[in-house]
Amino acid sequence: MTIQETARSNTKTSVGRLPAIRGSLAASPHFLNIFRPRSVTIEPSMRSVTELSISERLRQRFLKASRILVLTGAGVSAESGVPTFRGGGNSTVWKGMPFEVISSARMVDQDLSAVWEWFDFRRNLLQPLNPNRAHNEIANWQDRFSEFTLVTQNIDGLHQKAGSRDVFELHGSIWRVRCVSCQARFEILSSQPRAEACPDCGAPVRPDVVLFGEILPACAFEQAAAAAATCELCFVIGTSALVYPAAGLPELAQAAGAFVCEVNPERTPLSDRCDESMLGRAGEVLPLFSNLSKESDAQATATRVRTKSLETRLTAKD
Ligand code: OAD
């Protein structure tokens, strides 16, 4: 069985003004919902990363920032072989059902076994996959900045597999089940079949994933929003920026004065609003920053060497 994708004949997607979200972001609870925009036109475009370079202003921001927030979506895992939900004018369909339907709270009530079939399929697909260069680069960043926050909409666990710590999983994890009655959560071990019923109370279990129409995990969004409101630099990587409340985080960051940089091979509703849009694949764009890190390390070493020689001269003079 494969995930089918419905190709739209017209690759132009009509979207519209972003809603005034700041007020609603401050309010709780945060329901998962898709923003159905009305009027801006997104044109898919693919630009080779060889044409890409890091602009001087982004370079400066990256070298000087100490508080950084990274928001990722399905696109960051695309080069690991994980299918995205949207992109290139396509949208995922599972057995004739749009994924927003099969991934909905209503479907858990109506047909839990169909929901499990969809999530078991996806988990089996993910099982052998490994992090790609984008995940690895992001994992390297966590020790580079004094305050680093990684927020993901992905449920695939690939950031953690790459070594990222303390990841805010806004939409939960495909590697956990949750009891529909007592809400106890259990890890799914790749070596064992997943639980069919809650080991504590015997009630049915469901994927520990946020579905459409459901509320995000307690505090997860609030903590991510707090980090967005205080960061200096915000990267938005591999997301169509259509699913709220996650898609509101870059706007929060920008409103608080952060520099917002999007990395995506296609334009999104965020592209015209962010400070920099790097049109390219995450696995090709992000490694450009690793040279920058080395460059800045070299600069830092040069500074240390200069300082040291100054100290030596001062000592010699004394
Ligand atoms: P989408 O599938 O909506 O968007 C994926 C984005 O990744 C698109 O904008 C692509 O252009 C981009 N992309 C594709 N390949 C890429 C690459 N190599 N590098 C960088 N970007 C690339 O995924 P999300 O925005 O994550 O929620 O979707 C948000 C939520 O909608 C998901 O968490 C999921 C879905 O419903 C749930 O299922 C709860």
Image (spheres, rainbow, N blue to C red):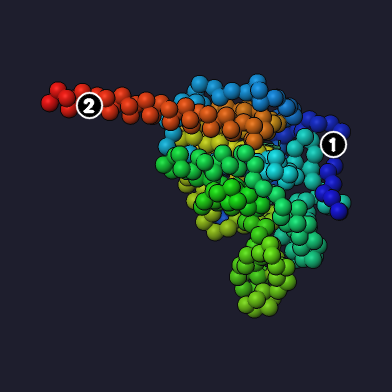
Name the spot of residue 89 as percent of width and height, x first.
79, 35
Kindly tell me whether mark 2's CB lies below 8 Å from ligand 1. no
Front-most of residues 149 and 106: 149
- What is the secondary structure assignment of the residue under circle 1? loop
Placement of 195 over or under 316, stated as above or below: below
Q: Secondary structure at mark 2?
A: helix
Q: Is residue 139 above or below residue 121?
A: above
User: For the residue marked with disc 1, what is the amino acid?
Assistant: Arg
Above or below, 16 against 35 in this view is above
Query: Dot 1, crowdedness within 10 Å: few (<14), some or many (≥20)?
Result: few
Instruction: Name the residue that disc number 1 marks.
Output: 8
Q: Position of residue 247 (x, y in %)?
A: 61, 42
User: Looking at the image, which residue sits at the far front?
Assistant: 316
Residue at 66% from the left image edge and 52% from the top image edge: 156
Say which residue appears at 86% left-offset and 53% top-offset. Answer: 1
| Residue under pointer 2 | 312
Q: Is mark 1 within 8 Å of ligand 1?
A: no
Q: Quadrant of residue 13?
A: top right
Q: Quadrant of the C terminus?
A: top left
Name which of mark 2 and mark 1 comes first in the sequence.
1
